[in-house]
Every structure is written in C-alpha cells, then in structure tokens.
Amino acid sequence: MILYLVIPCYNEEEVLKQTASALKKKMTSLIKDKKISKKSRVMFVDDGSKDKTWEIIAELHAQDELFVGVKLSGNRGHQFALLAGLMSAKDCSDATISMDADLQDDVNVIDKMLEDYQNGSEIVYGVRSSRRKDTFFKRTTAQMFYKLMQAMGVNIVYNHADCRLMSKRALKELENFKEVNLFLRGLVPLIGFKSSIAYYERGKRVAGESKYPLKKMLAFAADGITSFSIKPLRLILSLGIIILVISIFIMLYALIVKILGHTVAGWTFLTISIWFIGGLQMISIGIIGEYIGKIYNETKRRPRYIIETELK
Ligand code: UDP
Ligand code: MG
C-alpha cells in the first residue's frame, strides 16, 4: 500500500527540517513494519512561500527520495495548496494523509488511520481530542468556529481540521467537485463512503508562527458558511415576516395617534422606523450580495491552482 503524506507549507523554513526528520522517522518505521510500501512518499506543497521553504524542500528531495515537492506559482491559501498536493499525489498512491507542516497534528495518528484504512475506511477524519496546548485565544475562537458552522447547518466533523486520510477512490470523487470556493472540511463529508474518526492530541507549533491570524480565520468561517449553507438567506425571510407582523402593530398605533390628534408626536417614531428598516435592508442586501459574489466566482471556472514546478 503506497501512502503519500501531503504537507502544505507557507513560509515554514523555521520548522520544515524538524518536520521532515520527524516524518522520515515515522515513515521508515512504517516501511520496516511492512505497513506501507517502499514507494511511499512525503510530499511538501510550497504555497508560494516568500522565504527559503522551497530551497529546503529541494534540498530534502536531493538528499532522500522519500521527499517530493510541488511548488505553486503563488500563495493560494492552505485549502488550495492542500488540494494541489492531494490531486498530484492521487495517481501515484493508494491513500494520502494530509497534515500541517508545524507538527501540531500528532504523527502517531498515522498508525490508527492506516488501521482504519485496512478495515475498509475510505476517509479517516483526524479529530483533536484536546486542545490544551493551544493558546486560550486559538482554542475559544476555533471552538466558536465549529459551533457557528453547526448552527448555520454546515455539516462538518466537530474539531476536525484538515488532518485526514483519503483513499484513492475518495480523492477521485473529490476531483469531481469543481467549486472555486474551496472549503474542504465541508466538501469531504459530502463524498460519503465508509469513514471513521481517529483521535489525537493537538500539540504546540514546533517553530515559526501561525499563518492563520484572526482576520484569516473569520474570512475562512464566512467562506465556509456562504459556500455551504443557505441559512443566511432564510434568515432574511424570517426577518421579513417578523417586520411585517410588527408593522401591523405600528399601523394600528399610528392610526390611534392620528384619531387622537397628536400626529406631530409621531414624527420621532417615523424617523426611527425609517432608519431601522433602512439598516435592515442594507444588511439583507449585503447578504444577498455575498451569494451573488459566489455565483459570480463559480461561473468563472478559473483553474484552482497552477503548479509551477514538480519534483518527482
Ligand atoms: N498554510 C498554507 N498556506 C497559507 C497559510 C497556511 O499552505 O496561506 C499552511 C501552513 O504552512 C501550515 C498549515 O497551512 O502547514 C496550517 O497553518 P498554521 O499552522 O499556521 O495554522 P494554525 O495551526 O495556526 O491554525
Ligand atoms: Mg498550525
């Protein structure tokens, strides 16, 4: 069974060598135990790094055939780097496992994933059993992210990020999802097939710093919701109904005030209403605009990534 580890890297020069040696150790022992074939590889995907990441990957490749590399033509983001790696690994492997370059995902989860694969799972989701080693901020924001997704009706596996095993078959199906707004966490469960969960404890970043600041995380959450859920659209409808009901009461109130002859006093109320409804309309239009933006992007069918060089 040929296994490819797919590791997206963006400006990871500080941690890459350490990661490579840890992964090499794991892979060598798996090969020795005959759990995976000698043709298995560790594939680094350079997501348009601005530092020495690609030089390090090339150096690793020159030293050891275990390491292969793919370089994207520019920074496309984690999701696209991952997809690029998975798609180029798919044809030469039986299964892939994706992991972060910073070793936050415990390498020992690979054993459990392989076991599940042998038992027929096409997809094995790596789930963080604890986040004790994450900073308080990362932990709470990340947990809010999963809760929000669930509230919005996006079917994702709780506390599962992008550490997962996918079989060749699952990858072939993933290839058929042509959408440009890529949110793998939401897409992969849509593939179906037999799947399972492998728990691991999420560690600290070994070196370097997080490439996911709050701003990127919020954008990621917004992208996930608008790519997978029409709940925000339904909320507009609900809001509309509520406002309609309220407006009946307002009408009654306004009529009573008029009959009593205090019309000028109603002016304050009217002004407030106009502003209030104006605000609501703006929000609603904003949400619709978000979806129109998605349709716009989807219809363009742009290539999702462009590979500049490949070391194989
Ligand atoms: N990454 C990437 N492209 C980007 C940002 C991040 O390929 O534009 C990679 C990064 O090198 C790492 C993984 O995505 O392997 C996860 O990033 P990070 O560890 O910084 O995120 P965190 O664990 O803090 O959420
Ligand atoms: Mg990380």
Image (cartoon, rainbow, N blue to C red):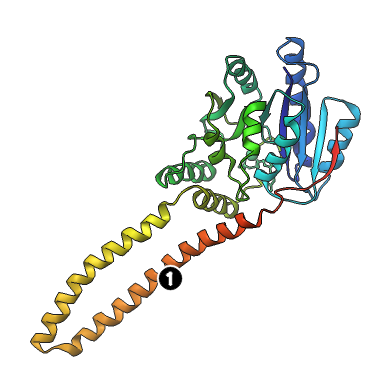
- The image shows residue 25 at horizontal and vertical percentages of 76, 20
Quadrant the N terminus occupies: top right
Residue at the spot x=75%, y=42% of the render?
12
Quadrant the C terminus occupies: top right
Report if residue 104 is visible in the image.
no
Camera-side residue of 145 and 87? 87
- The image shows residue 51 at horizontal and vertical percentages of 81, 48
Q: Is mark 1 within 8 Å of ligand 1?
A: no
Q: Is residue 158 above or below residue 254?
A: above
Task: Name the amino acid type tagged 1.
Answer: Met
Residue at the spot x=26%, y=62% of the render?
242
- The image shows residue 196 at horizontal and vertical percentages of 52, 23
- According to the picture, the residue beneath numbered tag 1 turns out to be 282
Q: Is residue 215 above or below residue 205?
A: below
In the picture, measured across the screen, residue 291 lies left or right of residue 99, that is: left
Q: Is residue 27 above or below residue 253?
A: above
Q: Quadrant of residue 307?
A: top right
Q: Residues within 10 Å of mark 1 (few under 14, many from 20)?
A: few
Camera-side residue of 295 and 219? 295
Q: Is residue 294 above or below residue 37?
A: below
Q: Quadrant of residue 79?
A: top right
Residue at the spot x=84%, y=38% of the render?
310
Q: Secondary structure at mark 1?
A: helix
In the picture, measured across the screen, residue 275 lies left or right of residue 246, that is: right
- The image shows residue 233 at horizontal and vertical percentages of 41, 57
- Looking at the rendering, the quadrant in which ligand 1 lies is top right
Report if residue 155 is visible in the image.
yes
Q: Quadrant of residue 61?
A: top right
In the picture, measured across the screen, residue 55 lies left or right of residue 262, that is: right
